[in-house]
Amino acid sequence: MIERLNDVGVERPMTESSLKVEDNNCVFEDAIFFDLEHYIYKKPICIGVFGCCFYDHKNQILKVTQYMIENKKDVRDILDLARSYFETMVEMGKKYIVTFSGNNDFTVINYLFEKYNIEFNIKDYFISIDLQKQYEKEMHKSIGLKALEKEFGINREDKVISGSNLAKTFSKIAKDSEYIKRMPEIKKEKILLYNQQDVVSLFDIYTKWNDVFASPVQNI
């Protein structure tokens, strides 16, 4: 399994620019920003990449943690690491989990937790903030993450990878223990960068929400 810990520099967030939740403008200090890449065939099969980050106020950086599958035996190991990560975040006082269309990811990881007898339910420990749902509530129309990034002027370092291509890759990894050895390093890097940009975008969008939409919001 690939385990990657990265520090990503970000602009210092302003509370008045951030999405307000339950009368709290400083949610970003108590939140984690979460995104999965996964493989589903009728039912969830595995997590391809677990990605999460939180804001380190003292150093003004995002602390990004990623776990990427390399073969079938990593399916359970990633779940154990995910639970450990979430438990550590709870111990650190994190109360919110920010996603985009997070119910899909929650469904996958909770299904796999249950399948492998891992006792943890994310929503028992974190208040969920779904930026897609919030956009739909305010704008009365649907949107994808990449389209929302454009509204915030977020430019990706690399080309967007389609979900179907990612699923095919993780399917091959789960079925063929030697496939990862044949995969070019640049492809692994692109997958990890794609996931990292997802979680960093969640932070950027959350902390600049009012700069773009400039409207008070209700509880989510």
Image (cartoon, rainbow, N blue to C red):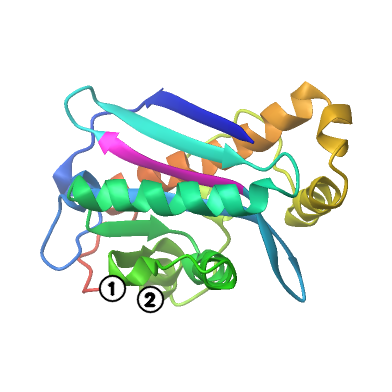
Q: Position of residue 149 (x, y in %)?
A: 51, 47
Residue indicated by mark 2: 137
Q: In this view, does 67 lie above or below 144?
A: above
Which percent across, then down, holds residue 159? 71, 36
Residue 115: say if magenta: no
**Kind of residue sitting beneath label 2:** Lys
Percent position of residue 4, x then y = 52, 29
Residue 107 horizontal side relative to residue 163, left or right: left
Q: Main secondary structure of the magenta part?
A: strand
Secondary structure type for disc 1: loop
Q: Is residue 18 left or right of residue 80?
A: left
- Residue closest to the eye, 63 or 24: 63
The correct choice, above or below, for 205 with respect to 215 in the image is above
Please name the residue that numbered disc 1 is placed on.
Answer: 220
Among the two numbered marks 2 and 1 on one chain, the one whose residue lies closer to the N terminus: 2
Residue 53, located in which quarter of the rendered image?
A: top left
In the image, which residues are magenta?
49-55
Residue ID at (81%, 47%):
169
Image quarter of the N terminus: top right
**Is residue 211 visible to us here?**
no
Q: Residue at 75% across / 43% down in the picture?
A: 71
Q: Which of marks 2 and 1 is in front?
A: 1
Q: Are marks 2 and 1 in contact (CB under 8 Å)?
A: yes
* Circle 2 crowding by C-alpha within 10 Å: few under 14, some 14–19, many from 20: some
The kind of residue tagged 1 is Ile
- List x then y, in percent, for residue 165: 81, 50
User: Residue 182 is drawn in which quadrant?
Assistant: top right
Q: Is mark 2 on a helix, strand or loop?
A: helix
Drawn side of residue 36 relative to residue 74, left or right? left
Q: Nearer the viewer, residue 16 or 115?
A: 115
